[in-house]
Image (cartoon, helix red, strand yellow):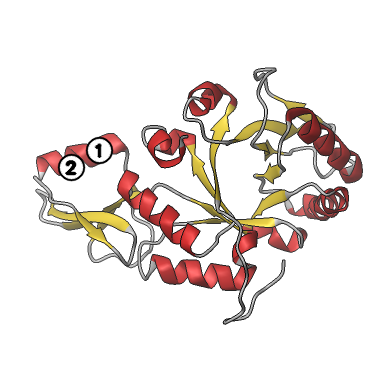
Amino acid sequence: IRKITRGETIMPEKTRAFLVVAAQDAAGAERTGAPCVRLCYRVGENGTLQRAQMSMTARGGLMGIYEAPGLAAGQPERLARDIQAECTRRGYGGVVLDLEPAAEALPNAERLCAALGRLGVRHFVPEALCSCAPEGKVIVPAAVSGGSFAQMLDALCTRYGAENLCLDLVRTCSDFTMPSYTPDGRPISPEELAQLQETYLAQSFYSPELCCKYFTYRSRAGGAHFVLFDDGDTAAAKLRAARERGVGYVFLLYSEWSREAKALLGG
């Protein structure tokens, strides 16, 4: 992965945003008009590429491999050729390796990424695997509960190069009991978020630093709480920040953003 130095000028390409969808969500996601990462593939125990049932007319976007139990025992070069063939057949612009391989599979993960590079297949890997993929795009969660979202984004662009960066726009929705000594609060559902706002008549505020919304309340037991959450407005702000910096790619998980997806990315 090429690192850029501070002050270096790069002519960025337009940021490309994708909805990440499982097979059962594909029809709803396609109605938004946004390109999709189709997490419909796995590497089976015998090391071969397997596809979940999906529409024969599904084309475009990116191919997504969500698990690879057979990676360690497989033949990475053959797997890379099979991925290339599927990308050609379906018109995919590359493959997302959404994997957390076991330690024994890391050598084959590195060989797979090298083979994809030789074949000219664009590939995306989570940050934990970036050392295995020197030509890959790096997927990094785009969420902060403290500090500055803009500074985090600038640091990531400096480290990986904006054109090599793929932000995973995680939907934050967490309840922190104060004082909080960890960056991770208790995850809450959208329904619980709405219930808390209604119960405590909580007024929400926007934090430009966090690029997120928040409110506070005091529970009936007397404890102070800080609730941090995303919505369509904060997602749009994060997308703007990514585009201003020339970030190459943004991913949004459809199951988290289905209500806002069309307004954010459609058409």
**Quarter occupied by residue 237:** bottom left
Q: Is residue 138 visible?
A: yes
In this view of the protein, which residue sits in the foreground, 102 or 40?
A: 40
Residue 43, horizontal then vertical, whole percent: 76, 35
- Is the N terminus in the top left, top right, bottom left or bottom right quadrant? bottom right
Asked if residue 67 is positioned above or below residue 134 in the image, the reply reads above
**Quarter occupied by residue 224:** bottom left
**Quarter occupied by residue 93:** top right
Secondary element at tag 1: helix
Residue 2, horizontal then vertical, whole percent: 71, 70
Residue 196, label in figure: 2
Residue name at image x 53 percent, y 21 percent: 27
Task: Judge left or right: residue 213 versus residue 94.
Answer: left
Q: Is residue 47 visible?
A: no
In this view of the protein, which residue sits in the foreground, 26 or 22?
A: 26
Q: Residues within 10 Å of mark 2 (few under 14, many from 20)?
A: some
Q: Residues within 10 Å of mark 1 (few under 14, many from 20)?
A: few
Residue name at image x 36 percent, y 32 percent: 259
* Gap between marks 1 and 2 measured at Cα: 6 Å
Asked if residue 26 is positioned above or below residue 110 in the image, the reply reads above
At label 1, which amino acid type do we have?
Glu
- Asked if the residue at tag 2 contacts the one at tag 1, i.e. Cβ–Cβ closer than 8 Å, the answer is yes
Residue 72, horizontal then vertical, whole percent: 82, 45
Residue 192, label in figure: 1
Asked if residue 243 is positioned above or below residue 37 in the image, the reply reads below
Task: Judge left or right: residue 232 versus residue 162.
Answer: left
Secondary element at tag 2: helix
Task: Judge left or right: residue 208 versus residue 71.
Answer: left
At label 2, which amino acid type do we have?
Leu
Residue 52, label in figure: none
Residue name at image x 40 percent, y 47 percent: 171
